[in-house]
Image: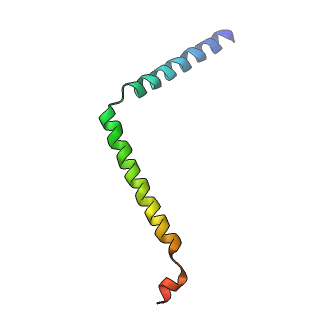
């Protein structure tokens, strides 16, 4: 039982160290590019939501 738990903790530790390493070794230019792209997509979504919320059935009846 103790050996199994120790093995699981060792495996979990390896996974966490790998994830941390992946975060630390990210290319800053790629991260900025992705962040800007996501920000642009989010702004577009907000604009569409804003336009849709201002519509009413009267807009379609004209």
User: Residue 32: x and y, percent?
Assistant: 34, 39
Q: Position of residue 35 (x, y in %)?
A: 38, 43
Relative side of 32 to 20, left or right: left
Left or right: where does residue 55 sit relative to residue 38? right
> Which quadrant would residue 3 be assigned to in this image?
top right
Residue 49 pos. (x, y %): 49, 65
**Whether residue 32 is situated above or below residue 44 in the rendered picture:** above
Height in image: 50 above or below 17?
A: below
Task: Please identify the residue farthest to the right as the structure is shown.
Answer: 1
> Residue at the bottom extreme?
62
| Rendered residue at 50%/22% (across/down) | 15
Residue at 49%, 89% (x, y): give it: 61
Q: Coloring scheme of the render? A: rainbow
Percent x, y of residue 17: 48, 20
Residue occupying image coordinates x 59% and y 16%: 9
Q: Nearer the viewer, residue 35 or 7?
A: 35
Image label count: 0
Locate residue 7: give its quadrant. Answer: top right
Instruction: Give the residue at x 46% y 60%.
Output: 46
Residue 58 drawn above or below residue 24: below
Question: In the picture, which quadrant includes the N terminus?
Answer: top right
Residue farthest top in this picture: 3
Give left or right: position of 6 versus 50.
Answer: right
| 55 over 4 or under it: above or below | below
């Amino acid at each position: 039982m103790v050996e199994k738990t120790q093995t699981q903790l060792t495996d979990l530790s390896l996974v966490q160290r790998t994830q941390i390493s992946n975060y630390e070794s990210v290319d800053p230019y790629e991260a900025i590019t992705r962040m800007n792209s996501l920000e642009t997509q989010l702004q577009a979504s907000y604009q569409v939501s804003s336009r849709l919320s201002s519509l009413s059935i009267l807009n379609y009846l004209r």
